[in-house]
Structures are given as C-alpha cells and as structure tokens.
Amino acid sequence: MSEYVDEAPPEDPYATTPAPVDTAVLIEQRVIGAAMRHPHQIPDMQRAVTGGDFHDLRLGAIFNGLIGLHATGAPTDYLAVYDRLQSWDVRGIELNDLSRWQDDTTGDGVYWAGLVREASVRRLLADVGQRLQHPDTDPGVALARAQQDLRTITDMQSAGGKSVRWLRDVLDVPEEADAYDWVIPDLLERQDRLMLSAAEGSGKSTMLRQIAILAAAGIHPFQFNQIDPVNVLVVDAENSERQWRRAARGLADTAAQRGRRDPRNHLALHCVPVMDVTRANDLGQLHRWIDECEPALMLLGPLYRVAGGSSLNTDEDVAPLLAALDSIRERGVAMLLEVHAGHARSTSGERELRPRGSSALLGWPEFGLGLRRDKKVEGRHPTFSLVRWRGDRDRRDWPDRLVRGQIFPWEPSF
C-alpha cells in the first residue's frame, strides 16, 4: 500500500477559487436575512441602524423597503422582497441570494444591526481623517470642518439611528447640561449670532465697538456692572487702524479704569481690505486668528465687504457665505455682524432696517436688530431705538432705547 494513500488528493490547478467573503458584507446580509425571517425584530433593528448606514447601498434600499412592508403589515419573506426589487431600484441581487440570506441567518438581528451601525461610524471617522490630511485644504478650514463633522457624528450616535426621536429622549438629559454658556450675561452666549443694521452714520459701528471693548475689559456693555472678561477678535473690513485709534482710545482708557482688566491686551484687531471668506485662503486666515487669540466673541463686518464686495442679492450668493460663517461659529464664538440696511421704506415712510440682499439672510442669525433714531425727541438729546427685524430665537435683555452717553458712547435711556 502506498504511503500516500491517506493523503488528500492534489488540488485541481484549473479549479476556480472562490472569492473570500468580506465580513462586513456578510454582516449586512445577515441584517437583511434577519429582517426577512423575523419581521417582529424590524422595529428594534430600525432603532439600531438606518438604510444609510449600509456600505452596500442596495442592501440599505432593501432594509428601508422592509421597514415599509412591515409598517403596512405586508409579508417580508424573500419572495415578497424579490418581487419589489425593481420598484426599489435594486439590481444585481438574485432570488437565491435572498433565500440564502434568510435561511443562513442566526442570532439576534438587532445585534447584527448594531455592528452595521458601528462600521458606518468608523467609515465616517475615516473620511474625516482623510479630509484633515488633504494637502490642498487650509489647516484652519479643515479643523473647523472636522469639528463640525464630529459633532454631527456624535449627534447621530446619541440619536441611536432611530427613525423617531421621542420627546422623552430629548428631555432625558440633566438640566444642568442646558445651562447658558454666557459670553455676556443675559445678552450673548457662545454660538449666538447677532446681525446689527442701521442707516449710514447712525452709530452701529460705535455700538459694536463698545460691546467688544467692554466685554474684553469685563464690563457689561449696557448695564455697566463688572462681568467675567473674555477675549475678543475684531475683523473690520471698513474702518482703518487710524479710525479705530481715534474712536477707541478714550473708550479703552475708561474701560481699563472701570473694568476688571485692560482690554488692550485681550482684544485682537485686524483692519483688512475687502476679503472673501468663501475662499479657502481668507477663511483659513480667520481660523488662524481664532487659533491665536482664542476669542469667545467675534466682531465681523460689514458683511458685504467680507463676502468679496458681493451684493448678496441671491440665495446662490448667500449660501456659501453663511456656510463659511457657520464654520466660524462652530469654533464656539458668539458672532456680531454689521450689516447695512436696505433702502426700502415702510408704509409709514420709515426706512426698513432689514439687511439688504437675499431674504436668506433674515433667517440665519439668532437675533436681528436695527438701530433707528426716534422721530419724537424727549428731553435734550435724541434717543435711538433697537428694533427687531426678526424674532429672537431666545430671550435676551437687549435695551429698548439708547442715548448718546456721558461715560460710554451708548447708554440705555430709561
């Protein structure tokens, strides 16, 4: 007897070698198989994963289709699914594939769905990492976008992939987690966006300058009591450094005497020509300045001059600008933006204070205020009203009326 009789026969060199099975694909197939075989698990699977989490988009479409079938009480077996593949725009999956997935499924479908969800998050994180390493992207822009992407991924995780987010889930958070993160108490918190408009020469630049300098000194800009000081970044695309020196020297002196610190060392000022923050270079420069001074408050404007001088008349003009500004807001700063009022007049003959340009600007900020001189003079000095050209998104204690002040440029009129 040959000594080789117990050995396995040699492999056929011409035989086709089966392709290795991708574990991730196998897991996604098991989710579909479990949904077809155990439709009662679909609601729980739906809380763990969405169709968009599937790497194989065809399987994601099938999963969404199965959710719809189950919701209407229709059969979910492989024959029912196969009959609907064309209407779901799914190609390349055969009847025997669906049959095998249904028959081979073992274990809890929710478990497999959770693994698909985890793989989806890992892919999203890998995409963020690749964008961070792209050589043509400004580092400041890349960092801001990465932070925004990571927040989105975190929100997706906290939502758990649920198709329905119940109020109980939203409220099931410690109340202290929703405490205001004030930059200026009762006036501005981090990530607030204020647009201030006025007719030319009304004093809106002076008002914004007052808010910036006093916040840096640790003084409430309208109540004038001491507060926690913050770092401030000012990017002025209209006024020169000479104009700032003339307007701010006395205000800075007074703020240093009455505040908690000298604002000169805590307000970064950049007077720039027209810039375009929709361009990577200019937006990256803003992010680098934020990196350097770590502000809690940022003053920027006028808006059209930081948008390359664009008239901002159309939504197409405005959309990239607002996206760029949102990347700044995501750095955790409160934003003050100077805008110019339109030239239209109301039925009473008063100039409208809504910002000129596309109506898309109206819905973007949390607060839209206009500074208007009152027609009726009470007392020796004219008063100015702060009027809202859009409703506030949250309660804030902005003064209703202002007057040219004795100590500070603008003081509340009581």
Image (cartoon, helix red, strand yellow):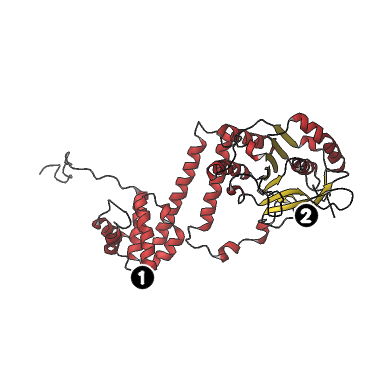
The circle on residue 400 is: 2
Query: Looking at the picture, how far across and down is residue 78, in whole percent?
Result: 28, 62
- Under mark 2, the amino acid is Asp
The circle on residue 145 is: none
Residue at point 38%, 54% (across, down): 60
Give the mark nearer the N terminus: 1 vs 2.
1
Can residue 106 be seen at all in this image of the molecule? no
Q: In the image, 339: left or right of 14?
A: right
Q: In the image, 72: left or right of 231?
A: left
Query: Looking at the picture, how far across and down is residue 290, in whole percent?
Result: 66, 37
* Residue 100: quadrant of the picture: bottom left
Is residue 140 or residue 381 the one in the foreground? 381
Real-space Cα distance between discs 1 and 2? 59 Å
In the image, farthest residue toward the top: 242
Is residue 303 or residue 218 the one in the foreground? 303
Is residue 110 or residue 89 the one in the foreground? 89
Q: Image quadrant for the C terminus?
A: bottom right
Residue at mark 1: 73
**Callout 2: helix, strand or loop?**
loop
Is residue 355 or residue 376 the one in the foreground? 376
Q: Is residue 136 positioned above or below 363 on the image?
A: above
* Residue 357: quadrant of the picture: top right
